[in-house]
Image (cartoon, rainbow, N blue to C red):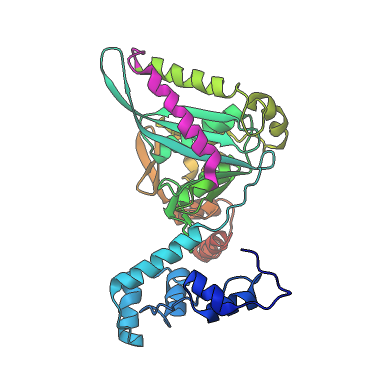
């Protein structure tokens, strides 16, 4: 119905026609063209109202659990609500944090390598033998060049071996490796609110290998999205069930798959990873000393020829032996954090493995000092003073 604005409108007549109140018609005519009036939202009172700041502070800044916050609010702030309300509120805080915008970025050449495992993959041979395997996964962020390796476990020694093999395969060391919060890397996981605590032995390995370890935040798998894609690609192996005879043959299938995916055009870069690697290699750190990395995972006896200063090197640190073993070959073994040194299967000394650069046993240092010092009466004081200086290096 079209209403002409230059004529007086009979609101009562229109109201009778449409069975409504004349005031409704008048209000419509006066306000036509305007946005409809929004209804006022009813305010819902929650038991957590007034406690939001305290809950957020304790949960986000101090990483306190919901049950602890509930107990504290009850005792200290007179909270009358239930534990489930506190738990629901903290859960929403966590979800809000997880849903923060993750900005997509492209890694600079040589900048990062992402690491993960394809765990407990079941493969069946032609004769029906079941093999439960793991696949070590690594991918360079810029070139998308991958190194994968079949393993039977995910121990720290195995991780060290796989990382060494990956660096060798890449022809250099990326500036940083990105891991999830695997126990072989971190002693305490990185969360939204806490920094990680890296495993001491792993830190030593990273220094010798020449990279910086990084761990991604828990509950945020997109951080290492590139390697997650590689994990999905490993499902191609399932097509080889009942198609191999031995574990060695399965290992060759894994190696062939690696070569294949490194030669395929990558969907994001639209380039072949093997070709893109040529540019990335220019930015990688130099290859490390692989014989040094091997000491972290090798089961072979660790041997050293004792130099003139009677200090042998293990994982970048120096440890003393008696002077009579200079120029002789000694073996080393690590047992429960102690470095045991043998000559012809006889234990000659034991050191605590620590962070000091030079580790002298007092009797070894006194023996060496006595060969060059004339003042024998004060030799104990010299030993004590100099050993204290070594401790501060």
* Residue 162 to residue 40: above or below: above
> In the figure, residue 6 lies in which quadrant?
bottom right
Of residue 91 and residue 109, the one placed in the foreground of this image is: 91
The quadrant of the picture occupied by the N terminus is bottom right
In the image, residue 58 sits, relative to residue 284, either above or below, namely below
Q: Residue at x 44, y 77 (%)?
A: 42
Say whether residue 232 is magenta: yes
* Highlighted range, magenta: 223-246
User: Majority secondary structure of the magenta segment?
Assistant: helix
Residue 50 is situated, as x and y percent measured from the top left of the image, at 43, 83
Q: Nearer the viewer, residue 181 or 351?
A: 181
Q: Is residue 289 magenta?
A: no
Residue pictured at 63% horizontal, 75% vertical? 29
Residue 86: % across, % down: 35, 72
> Taking the image as drawn, is residue 114 in sight?
yes
Front-most of 360 and 268? 268
Name the quadrant of the C terminus. Answer: bottom right
Locate residue 225 relative to residue 241 in the image: left or right. right
């Amino acid at each position: 119905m079209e209403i002409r604005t230059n004529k007086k409108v009979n609101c009562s007549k229109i109201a009778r026609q449409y069975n409504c109140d004349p005031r409704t018609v008048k209000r419509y005519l006066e306000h036509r063209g305007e946005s409809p009036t929004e209804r006022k939202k009813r305010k819902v009172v929650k038991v957590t109202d007034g406690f939001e700041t305290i809950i957020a502070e304790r949960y986000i800044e101090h990483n306190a659990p919901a049950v602890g916050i509930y107990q504290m609010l009850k005792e200290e702030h007179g909270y009358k609500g239930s534990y489930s309300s506190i738990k629901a509120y903290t859960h929403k805080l966590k979800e809000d944090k997880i849903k923060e915008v993750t900005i997509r970025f492209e890694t600079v050449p040589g900048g990062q390598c992402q690491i993960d495992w394809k765990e407990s993959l079941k493969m069946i041979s032609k004769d029906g033998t079941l093999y439960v395997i793991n696949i070590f996964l690594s991918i360079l962020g810029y070139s998308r060049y991958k190194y994968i390796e079949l393993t039977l476990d995910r121990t720290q020694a195995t991780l060290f071996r796989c990382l060494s093999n990956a660096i060798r395969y890449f022809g250099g060391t990326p500036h940083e490796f990105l891991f999830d919060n695997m126990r072989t890397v971190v002693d305490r996981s990185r969360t939204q609110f806490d920094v990680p605590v890296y495993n001491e032995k792993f830190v030593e390995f990273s220094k010798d290998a020449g990279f910086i370890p990084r761990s991604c935040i828990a509950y945020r798998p997109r951080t290492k999205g590139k390697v997650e894609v590689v994990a999905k690609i490993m499902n191609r192996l399932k097509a080889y069930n009942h198609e191999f005879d031995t574990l060695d043959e399965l290992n060759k299938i894994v190696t062939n798959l690696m070569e294949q995916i490194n030669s395929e055009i990558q969907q994001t870069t639209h380039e072949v990873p093997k070709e893109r690697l040529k540019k990335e290699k220019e930015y990688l750190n130099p290859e490390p000393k692989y014989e040094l990395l091997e000491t972290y995972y090798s089961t072979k006896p660790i041997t050293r020829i004792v130099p003139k200063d009677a200090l042998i090197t293990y994982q970048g640190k120096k440890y003393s032996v008696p002077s009579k073993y200079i120029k002789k070959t000694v073996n080393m073994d690590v047992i429960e954090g102690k470095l045991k040194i043998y000559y012809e299967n006889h234990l000659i000394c034991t050191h605590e493995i620590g962070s000091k650069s030079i580790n002298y046993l007092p009797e070894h240092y006194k023996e060496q000092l006595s060969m060059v010092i004339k003042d024998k009466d004060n030799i104990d004081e010299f030993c004590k003073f100099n050993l204290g200086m070594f401790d501060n290096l």
